[in-house]
Amino acid sequence: MREQLKNKQIMLAPLAGVSDVGFRLIAEKYGADKTFTEMVSVNALYYDNKKTDDLLFISENEKNCNIQIFGSKPELIEKVVKDKINPIEKSKEISFNMGCPVAKITKNGEGSALMAKPKLVEEICKILRKSTDKKINIKFRLGIDDKNLNYLEIGKIAQDAGIDYVILHARTKEQMYSGKANWNHIKILKENLSIPVIANGDIFCVEDFVKVIDKTKADGVMLARGAMGNPFLFKEIKDYINKGFYEKPSSTQIIDQLIEQYKLELKYKKEKLVVTQMRKHLSWYIKGLENSSKIRDLVNKLNTIEEVMDALEKYKSTLKG
């Protein structure tokens, strides 16, 4: 059984507000084969939005971080890839997002809304391939809704256009993140394409990883919500592949990793921003730990890193294991 798990790529998804430099470095530390920036708007890059430019930043310490973009205008995509992304030597790949179901993205005809326009998808795929020598992947969903499942058509369009591999989130646009991911569709896509297919959706533990590979024969997985507050999952999967067993982190190891992330974030962001942005990460890390709601409520009221570090160290001393 474990033989079929070997040589599978384990990737960190591009997660808005989550997969910043600090978290990407931690994911790499635990064994992520690839990471991706938060989604970057082609339109914003084209119009030189400074905040969006910051999203392109890749640390010199990152080994395999790549850039994900989203947009819907082929001419802008071509210019942005050539002028802004090709010069970034640290990024060996470009991921194009056709999977985001969030209204502020789809209302502009971007993200998963593109799946309703196969001809435009074909044009975008061809423009991407023409614009760069970097490896390209397309991330998409099953379709707009259950009555319009066209992932197979989109996958074949991508393959015919010269896209290197595809990532399928096994939900529809309409589903958002609700319900269950239907891995059977990943299996169908894998059986019908010759390029690699990466499985995405509902992979929260080692057992999920084993099941999705066994069912779909996918070439790897992309961890999204399953990695939030749980970068240990990369190591657990790798340990199971290589050794046949894995260990869950102790409560104190979880807090130590949380503290390390705070310190990493401070290298790249201002203290005030780190204190506020890390609140959601803290909530994910400590979920299920003893008295987690109390420490969460306390830290959410604190304003300095010194106060946060003191609170976390005191909390750690109360934990067993």
Image (cartoon, helix red, strand yellow):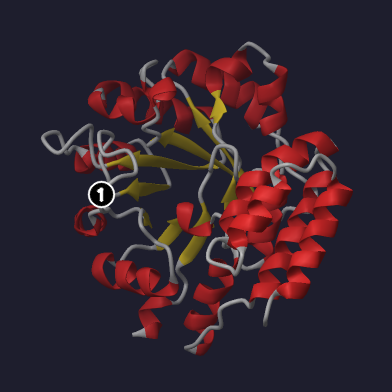
- Going 36% across and 32% down the picture, which residue do you hit? 101
Residue 49: x and y, percent? 67, 16
Q: Nearer the viewer, residue 83 or 20?
A: 20
- Residue 258's x, y, as percent? 71, 60
User: How far from the left and from the top, in percent, is residue 219?
Assistant: 38, 63
- Foreground residue, 238 or 171? 171
Q: Which residue carries the number 1 mark? A: 179
At 33% from the left edge and 69% from the top edge, which residue is drawn?
A: 213
Q: Residue furthest top?
A: 47
**In the figure, is residue 119 to the left or right of 76?**
left
Q: Position of residue 88 (x, y in %)?
A: 70, 36
- Residue at point 39% right, 15% down? 108
The N terminus sits in image quarter: bottom left
The quadrant the C terminus occupies is bottom right
Q: Quadrant of residue 112?
A: top left
Location of residue 117 with respect to 57 vertically, above or below: above
Q: From where the camera sits, is residue 64 visible?
A: no
In the rendered view, tell whether residue 127 sits above or below residue 25: above
Local crowd size for mark 1, using a 10 Å CA cut-off: few (<14), some (14–19), many (≥20): few
